[in-house]
Amino acid sequence: MGITSRGCSTSRQSRWCSWDTAWEAIVFQNADVDEENGVVSLKMDGVREVAYGDCSEEDVEWAKSHLIPQPLAPFVTPVQVSETHYGSVRRTYIECLQDKAIGPAAQKRMYTDTPCEKVVSMETSHSPFLSQPEELAGHLDSLAKL
């Protein structure tokens, strides 16, 4: 397994991390990859820009205090799904239009490659649960009633 400077696996590109969408996600240039231990961590000096661009300073500091290294395996391990099981699950998507962790083109690729019943767009960064919790809760409530 190898991780490139853009964060995509050199052994297998994930469905959302392709060369035509990776450029817009600044998360890769703000991450430290530790292949020996199989984890990736966000650099603290870039975390606001990557994931919390529209959050209050208080929320950013709270989030930073809770960040931990994430395993690399989910980013580079192929997943096998079937129409019988995964294909029968109803899907919705909340698109974050100001997201710098997973940019708009990558998000669109995800929800078009795996069609969703409904796509809701929010003018938020990667973390609407912090920046716009009431709006997000309203969307989740309406999606739960579909």
Image: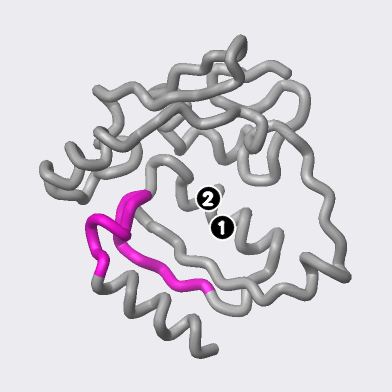
Q: Check the image and name the residue furthest to the top.
A: 36
User: Residue 89, percent across and down?
Assistant: 72, 73
Which residue is drawn at the image coordinates 53% and 14% (left, top)?
34
Q: In the picture, residue 48 is in which quadrant?
A: top left
Cα distance in 3D space between marks 2 and 1: 5 Å
User: Residue 58, percent across and down?
Assistant: 11, 44
Give the vertical position of 119 relative to 142 (above or below).
Answer: above
Q: Amino acid at mark 1?
A: Lys
Q: Amino acid at mark 2?
A: Ala
Q: Is 80 part of what is drawn in magenta?
A: no
User: Residue 91, percent across and down?
Assistant: 63, 72
Q: Are marks 2 and 1 in contact (CB under 8 Å)?
A: yes
Q: Left or right: where does residue 24 sit relative to residue 79?
A: left
Which residue is drawn at the image coordinates 18% and 47% (left, top)?
59
Residue holding disc 2: 105
Give the vertical position of 11 relative to 86 (above or below).
Answer: above
Which residue is drawn at the image coordinates 72% and 21% (left, top)?
10
> Which circle marks residue 94 in the picture?
none
In this rendered view, identify the residue nearer to me: 107 or 134: 134
Which residue is drawn at the image coordinates 28% and 24% (left, top)?
44
Q: In the structure shown, which secondary structural element does the residue marked by tag 1 occupy?
A: helix
Mark 1 neighbour density, 10 Å: few (under 14) some (14–19) many (20 or more): some
Q: Left or right: where does residue 51 sit relative to residue 35?
A: left
Give the vertical position of 91 relative to 51 (above or below).
Answer: below
Q: In the structure shown, which secondary structural element does the residue marked by tag 2 occupy?
A: helix
Mark 2 neighbour density, 10 Å: few (under 14) some (14–19) many (20 or more): some
Q: Left or right: where does residue 111 sit relative to residue 145?
A: right
Q: Which residues are magenta?
A: 119-133
> Which circle marks residue 108 in the picture?
1
Give the vertical position of 61 relative to 143 (above or below).
Answer: above
User: Residue 18, percent across and down?
Assistant: 65, 37
